[in-house]
C-alpha cells in the first residue's frame, strides 16, 4: 500500500514581507524560489523558500500580512518546523548565528540529536537540528504537531499515512511522540506533542497555517482522497496551486493537512535558474497585474 513520503511544504503567516525575506534568505541562506500572490487574496504576497530548485521537503512558504496581529501556537496547530543541518556544519552555523547576535530561544538534545531554536522576525520558532542524514541546510528535519489528544492524530498518521512510531521523550511539561515516514528522505519526521496545562492557540503572524504532505502524482493523490474518505476524513476537491495540485482536510486534532503533488514544480512558469526573481501571477490574475503590483510593497531580495 502506498505510504506518505514525508513533508512537501510548510505554510506559515508572517508580518511585513521584507523582514521575512531578509531573515530567511540573508540569515538562514534559503533561496526565494517563488514570488507570487496569495491566490485567495491577490493583494498580498505568497513567498516560497527552499533549495535552488524548490524541491519537495525543502519548501517553506509565507503569507505575509503587514497588519497581521501576533498569533500564538497551541493545541490543534502545527507549532514548529525544523531544518536538518549536516553534522559537520552544525557548530560553524550555530557559531555564525551567535556572532551575528541572533539569540537562541533554546538549545538541547532531542532523540539524541543536538538542536537550537531561533526566533524569526515574528517570534516564530525556527529549529535547526544536527542530522547525519542531511546533505545540505535546506531540507526539513521534522514538523511538530501540538495536540490536546495525540492518539487520534497518531492513529491517522500510522494507520492511514503509513508512519511508524519511533519513541517518546519528555521535555519538561512536553510529551513528545516521534513518527517517521519510512523510505522518505527529507521531512520524514513528525513529532506529536502534548503539553500539560496548555492554553488555546490563535492563528496570526508567527504561526503555521498548514502542513502539506507529498504525493507523487495526480493518480496517487486521488487514491489518497479515496482512502481518507474511507477512513472518515472528507477532503476538499483538487485545487490547482499552479506549482502543485492540492487537497486539504482537518486532521482529528484540528491541524489543517494538505496533500500536494510533486509535479509540476516551480520551473513551470519561469526559468529554473532565475526562480523567485520576477513576480509570477497565475493566468487568471495576469489581467490585473498593474493593479496588483501597485498594491504589493516593494521587496528587495539579495541573490
Ligand atoms: Zn499548502
Image: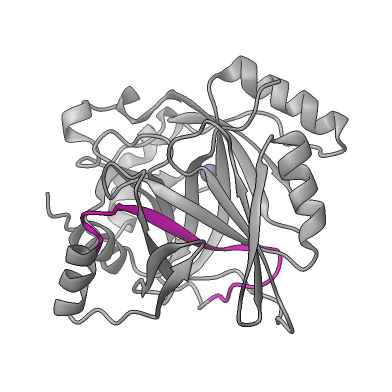
Count numbered badges in the picture: 0
Q: Is residue 25 magenta?
A: no
> Which of the two residues, 172 or 277, is positioned nearer the viewer here?
172
Q: Which residue lies furthest to the top in this view?
A: 219
**How has the structure been colored for display?**
one colour
Spot occupied by residue 5 in the image (x, y as percentages of width and height): 55, 32
Residue at 48 percent across and 72 percent down: it is 68
Camera sees residue 177: no
Image point (53%, 22%), residue name: 216
* Residue 158 visible in the picture: yes
In the image: residue 83, left or right of residue 39: left
Q: In this view, does 1 lie to the left or right of 29?
A: right
Quadrant for residue 259, please give it. Answer: top right
Q: Is residue 124 above or below residue 43?
A: below
- The N terminus lies in which quarter of the figure? top right
Q: Residue at x 23, y 36 (%)?
A: 275
Determine which quarter of the picture holds residue 105: bottom left
Question: Please, which residue is most extreme toward the front here?
Answer: 112
Image-based side of 165 in relation to 284, left or right: right
Foreground: 103 or 115? 115
Q: Give the range drawn in magenta.
A: 71-90
Figure check: 108 above or below 298: below
* Residue 89 shown in magenta: yes
Residue 112 higher or lower than 258, as above or below: below
Q: Residue at x 36, y 43 (%)?
A: 133
Q: Position of residue 217 (x, y in %)?
A: 54, 19
Q: Horizontal and vertical percent for residue 187?
A: 47, 44
Percent x, y of residue 185:
44, 35
Amino acid at each position: 500500500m502506498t505510504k506518505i513520503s514525508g513533508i512537501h511544504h510548510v505554510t506559515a503567516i508572517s508580518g511585513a514581507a521584507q523582514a521575512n525575506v531578509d531573515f530567511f534568505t540573508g540569515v538562514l541562506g534559503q533561496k526565494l524560489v517563488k514570488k507570487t500572490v496569495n491566490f485567495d487574496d491577490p493583494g498580498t504576497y505568497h513567498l516560497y523558500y527552499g533549495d535552488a530548485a524548490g524541491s519537495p521537503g525543502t519548501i517553506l512558504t509565507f503569507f505575509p500580512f503587514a497588519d497581521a496581529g501576533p498569533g500564538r501556537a497551541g493545541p490543534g496547530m502545527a507549532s514548529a518546523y525544523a531544518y536538518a543541518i549536516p553534522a559537520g556544519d552544525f557548530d560553524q552555523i550555530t557559531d555564525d548565528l551567535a556572532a551575528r547576535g541572533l539569540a537562541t530561544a533554546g538549545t538541547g538534545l532531542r532523540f539524541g540529536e543536538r538542536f537550537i531554536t531561533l526566533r524569526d522576525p515574528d517570534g516564530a520558532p525556527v529549529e535547526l537540528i544536527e542530522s547525519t542524514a542531511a546533505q545540505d541546510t535546506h531540507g526539513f528535519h521534522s514538523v511538530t504537531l501540538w495536540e490536546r489528544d495525540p492518539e487520534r492524530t497518531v492513529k491517522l498518521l500510522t494507520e492511514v499515512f503509513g508512519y511508524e512510531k519511533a519513541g517518546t521523550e519528555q521535555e519538561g511539561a512536553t510529551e513528545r511522540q516521534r513518527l517517521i515516514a519510512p523510505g522518505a528522505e527529507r521531512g520524514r519526521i513528525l513529532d506529536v506533542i502534548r503539553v500539560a496545562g496548555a492554553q488555546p492557540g490563535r492563528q496570526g503572524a508567527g504561526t503555521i497555517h498548514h502542513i502539506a504532505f507529498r504525493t507523487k502524482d495526480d493518480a496517487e493523490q486521488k487514491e489518497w482522497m479515496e482512502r481518507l474518505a474511507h477512513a472518515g476524513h472528507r477532503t476538499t476537491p483538487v485545487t490547482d496551486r499552479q506549482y502543485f495540485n492540492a487537497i486539504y482536510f482537518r486532521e482529528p486534532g484540528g491541524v489543517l493537512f494538505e496533500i500536494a503533488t510533486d509535479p509540476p514544480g516551480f520551473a513551470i512558469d519561469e526559468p529554473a535558474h532565475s526562480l523567485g526573481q520576477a513576480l509570477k501571477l497565475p493566468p487568471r490574475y495576469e489581467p490585473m497585474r498593474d493593479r496588483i503590483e501597485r498594491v504589493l510593497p516593494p521587496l528587495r531580495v539579495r541573490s
